[in-house]
Image (cartoon, helix red, strand yellow):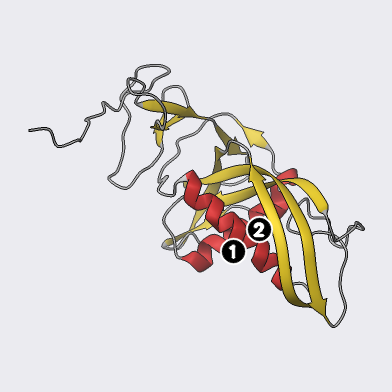
Amino acid sequence: MSTGLTLVRLACPRCGSPLEAEGEDVVYYCPACHTGSRLAQGPPGVPLSPVEVTFVARPDVEVARYLPFWLLPARVEISQRSTAGGSLSGLMRLFSGEAGAPSNAAGEQREAAFAIPAFAAPLAVRVALARRYTEALPQLGEKLGEQLTGTRISEEDARKLAHYLLVDAEAARPDTLQGLVYSIVFGDGWLLGVPFVASGSVLVDAFFGLPAT
């Protein structure tokens, strides 16, 4: 009797090395060739599809672990933003660190990228890290592969948090938000390994000192 289940051998589709995985992982990282793989959504016979992986450079600290973030390129458009008590032009400073950048509020589009934690953590922790790293992305340098662990959040769930992050950032602006109509068109995401350092018994990120738990 068929159960409808398919066993997938976890071997890197690029180099053939075995992949280590925990039960809740959704992306599997290959330490041999520094690439990521996830279960394919496409045709049968190709069980794993590649996921690009890059890392953030922080050479001046002793890194304890690199934790994964989904890096989600996107086109963001705010078509309507109604407020009480005044209004501000331009998208929130969530992108590019451009506080108060002049632009038209209605119909404004911007090419952007969200950085969403892809490891298990409380929602408040993930939102705080996502906000800081989405703001800081243009200033972060990259480096060659390291060891990446703990990819527990799917790209689809990361996109949901990106929507939350956008609305939360707009609501936090110093006017009174009454209505918001927007759209986000995502491109293909990839993983970004962010350095975390040990601080006592907890891990904190290497740039802002925010905890991972």
The number of discs equals 2
Q: Is residue 109 left or right of residue 114?
A: right
Q: Which residue is mark 2?
A: 132
How packed mark 1 is, by other alpha carbons closer than 10 Å (few <14, some 14-19, many 20 or more), is: some
| Callout 2: SS | helix
Q: Nearer the viewer, residue 57 or 128?
A: 128
Picture coordinates of residue 188, whole percent (x, y): 58, 35
Where residue 48 sits, quadrant-wise, is top left
Q: Which residue is mark 1?
A: 128
For the residues labelled 1 and 2, say whether their Cβ atoms are less than 8 Å apart.
yes
Instruction: Tell me how far mark 1 sits from mark 2, CA to CA.
Output: 6 Å
Amino acid at the residue labelled 1:
Ala
Name which residue lies at 49% across and 65% down.
123
Picture coordinates of residue 155, whole percent (x, y): 49, 44
Where residue 6 sits, quadrant-wise, is top left
Picture coordinates of residue 58, whole percent (x, y): 63, 43
Say which quadrant the N terminus sits in.
top left
